[in-house]
Image (cartoon, rainbow, N blue to C red):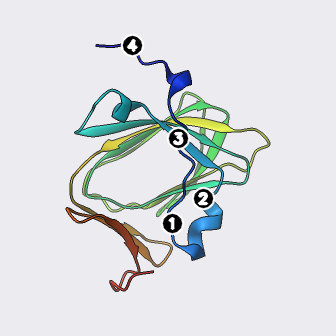
Amino acid sequence: MPKIDVRNLLIEQSVDYPLPFKKAVEGNARKRLGRAAGLTQFGVNICTLKPGADLIAAARKTKSILFMCSRRGGLCEDNGKTVRKAGETAVWKAGVPNSHCLIDRGKLNAIFIEIGSCAPTERAYHSDIDMMVVYDDVDSRYMRKDGTPY
């Protein structure tokens, strides 16, 4: 296995959320460690959430894990709000609907690792906003829950 120097990985800061939700996720950056290693069945990303930024994730058919590396973040899920501190995790089981959002309301960047499936097709729903994302063999796209595009 080749060594991957995380310092040299590209920092992705693009936010492709539709306009009503784009502002909330600005300040979210990731380094795609899994992609750099050639992983195809799951992704591993090292993420930075700047103060005031949100990471909005949807309820998916696939599983995902979040591991806080530094600082703390407010975790909002369908069943309430909690805080995740450095060294703590959150795990979402496949097929269990539970939208989640990590929010950094501190004064320093929150660093965390996200791990999740790289399923070729997926529909993910956001319970608290009128948005779903569809991944299929055509592309990925954001739509309203009734299926109309943004």
Q: Crowding near pointer 4: few (<14 within 10 Å), some, many (20+)? A: few
Query: Which residue in the protein does label 3 denote?
Result: 30
Q: Label 3's element? A: strand
Q: Is residue 79 left or right of residue 115?
A: right
Q: Which residue is mark 4?
A: 3
Instruction: Give how far across and how far down residue 140 sits, in percent.
Output: 33, 64
Q: Local crowd at mark 2 within 10 Å, few (<14), some, or many (≥20)?
A: many
Q: Nearer the viewer, mark 2 or mark 4?
A: 4
Residue ID at (58%, 44%): 29
In primary-sequence order, the first of circles 2 and 4 is 4
Q: Residue at x 21, y 59 (%)?
A: 121
The residue under label 2 is 25
Name which residue type carries label 4.
Lys
Circle 2: element type:
helix
Q: Type of residue at label 1?
A: Tyr
Q: Is residue 130 visible?
A: yes
* Dots 3, 2 in contact, CB < 8 A: no
Q: Amino acid at mark 3?
A: Arg
Q: Residue at x 34, y 39 (%)?
A: 43
In 3D space, how far apart are the residues under numbered discs 3 and 2 (Cα atoms)? 12 Å
Q: Earlier in the sequence, mark 1 or mark 2?
A: 1
Near mark 3 (Cα within 10 A), the count class, few <14, some 14-19 or many ≥20, is: many
Residue 85 screen position, x and y as percent: 61, 35
Tell me, for residue 17, which label it has, or none.
Answer: 1
Label 2 to label 4, Cα distance in Å? Answer: 31 Å
Circles 1 and 2 in contact, beta carbons < 8 Å: yes
Kindly report the distance in space between the C-alpha atoms of the residues bearing marks 1 and 2: 8 Å
Q: Position of residue 11 (x, y in %)?
A: 55, 38
For the residues marked 3 and 4, what is the alpha-carbon distance in whole angstroms?
Answer: 19 Å
Residue beneath the point at 64% across and 57% down: 26
Residue 51 vs residue 122: left or right?
Answer: right
